[in-house]
Amino acid sequence: MKKITILDVQKMKADGQKITMLTAYDCCIARLLDECSLDIILVGDSLGNVVLGFENTIPVTMADMLRHVPAVARGRQRALVVADMPFMSYQVSIEEAKRNAGMLIKEGGAEAVKVEGGENMENVIRALVDIDIPVMGHIGLTPQSIHRMGGYRVQGKGEHQRQKLMADALAVERAGAFAIVLEAIPASLSSEMTRMLKIPTIGIGAGADCDGQVLVIHDLLGLSGTFRPKFVKQYARLDESIKRAVSEYIDEVKTGTFPTAEHSFK
Ligand code: KIV
């Protein structure tokens, strides 16, 4: 089995092969995704929303990431593991950014980090790439900027915002990122960016023309409750399967039909 590297991801763009990425936060799901030959596993700071129960990604800490990134890394053999840098782990200084990104690689076992931001993060991305830490950029709807954006809204709609996002994408590429996530932007804009950039674009709510796609695994599996943005496709309803199984278990324990001799020791 061939291990996926950032070079393979870049070659996929050159070869016109779509790149597949999903999030995972634990060893069990990482192993399953890996067994499906997914290209990239992202340990997203969406951890805050879907696993830790926060309203947004702002409260996620380096300690949280350093607990979950190694768990994911232990579950994969083939996929490239990318770790999100949580809010305030890279914004204060380049030194802190380097130290924190280094920990995600060295202690976490990730092979790359993801940083939100465009022109404003060009220096940070360049500094990490300069010390051999591969960086995935992330522009458009950047959840760590929720307070500036005033909520989760589609970005890049007017001409001014469109130009700004184009400048952001070019800054991320110029800084040396190996790929870039485009979140919640019009399909026509991501299409133009994908043609303009040499690095692969990975879209979430950014249309079909990106070089790859990413979704949050809980959204794809139907584990996100009533939260369902337009760009999410539910490929399963694990919520219903889990509730059915747990209700059956409760019923059988209450009525004494579980455990039977089959599940007991002699
Ligand atoms: O944190 C995350 O899961 C992400 C993806 C939605 C791209 O950043």
Image: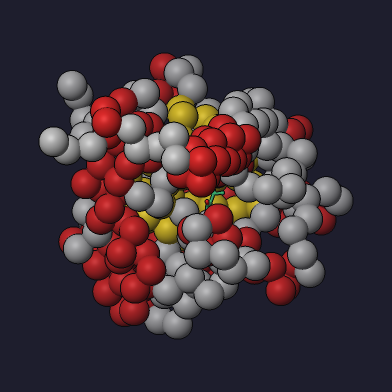
Q: How many marks?
A: 0
**Measuring 72% from the left and 49% from the top, which residue is drawn there?**
227
Q: Residue furthest bottom?
A: 92
**Quadrant location of the C terminus in the rendered image:** top left
In-image side of 54 versus 61 (left or right): right
Q: Is residue 191 above or below residue 155?
A: above
Q: Is residue 139 left or right of residue 187?
A: left
Locate residue 171, reporting x and y percent.
53, 55
Residue at (37%, 32%) from the top-left corner? 33
Q: Confirm whether residue 135 shows in the render.
A: no
Q: Residue 70: which quarter of the image?
A: bottom left
Residue placed at 59% from the left, 68% from the top? 54
Which picture quadrant has residue 132?
A: bottom left
Query: In what quadrant of the picture does the N terminus appear?
Result: top left
Q: Nearer the viewer, residue 134 or 242?
A: 242
Q: Position of residue 90 (x, y in %)?
A: 42, 73
258 or 218, nearer to the observer = 258
Q: By what rule are the colours in the image chosen?
A: secondary structure
Q: Residue furthest right?
A: 158
Residue 178 placement: quadrant: top left
Residue 30: x, y in percent? 34, 40
* Residue 159 located left or right of residue 140: right
Compare residues 27 and 177 and report the one nearer the observer. Answer: 27
The answer to whether residue 64 of the structure is visible from this angle is yes
Image location (x, y in percent) of residue 56: 62, 66
| Residue drawn at point x = 86 percent, y = 51 percent | 158
